[in-house]
Image (tube, rainbow, N blue to C red):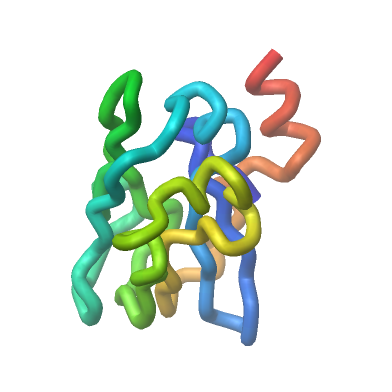
Amino acid sequence: KFTEEHEWIAVEDGQIAVIGISKYAADALGDVVYVELPQLGSKIGAGEPIGAIESVKSASDIYSPLTGEVIEINDKLEGKPGLINAEPYNKGWIAKIKFDNTEELDQLLDNTAYLNFLA
């Protein structure tokens, strides 16, 4: 699933969501040089900023697609922020959250809707 702010989520284990930015966003940003990760244990609301990405071109906030609690962060990005460019859907994930409201998933775009949004 995707947001119009170019974040993606993948649900694993029922109520755990992996969050990252889309390949489109990673390509638009250019070479990522720094990632501000969210704080473990922080409570976040859907649409709220949870971190930021800085690249050679610009800086951009990262927004949470869902309401929940940050339970894991990808600390590999601290030493290798370029993983976001190289593998945005795999090793370049940003955080995992335990989300509260499964109905929020219905507000997100599926792959087809996201591609139509980009067009």
Q: In front: 8, or 79?
A: 79
Q: Where is residue 95 shown, x and y percent of the image?
A: 41, 66
Q: Where is residue 82 shown, x and y percent of the image?
A: 46, 47
Residue projecting furthest to the front:
79
Residue in the image at 52% along x and 56% along y = 92
Q: Quadrant of the C terminus?
A: top right
**In the image, 82: left or right of 70?**
right
Asked if one can make out residue 100 in the rendered structure from this viewpoint, the answer is no
Q: Where is residue 30 shown, x and y percent of the image?
A: 46, 26
**In the image, 66: left or right of 60?**
right
Residue projecting furthest to the top:
119
Residue in the image at 39% along x and 38% along y = 32
Residue in the image at 54% along x and 41% along y = 85
Q: In front: 38, or 106?
A: 38
Residue in the image at 52% along x and 78% along y = 16
Q: Where is residue 86 shown, x and y percent of the image?
A: 60, 46
Q: In front: 39, or 58?
A: 58
Q: In front: 24, or 85?
A: 85
Asked if one can make out residue 16 in the rendered structure from this viewpoint, the answer is yes
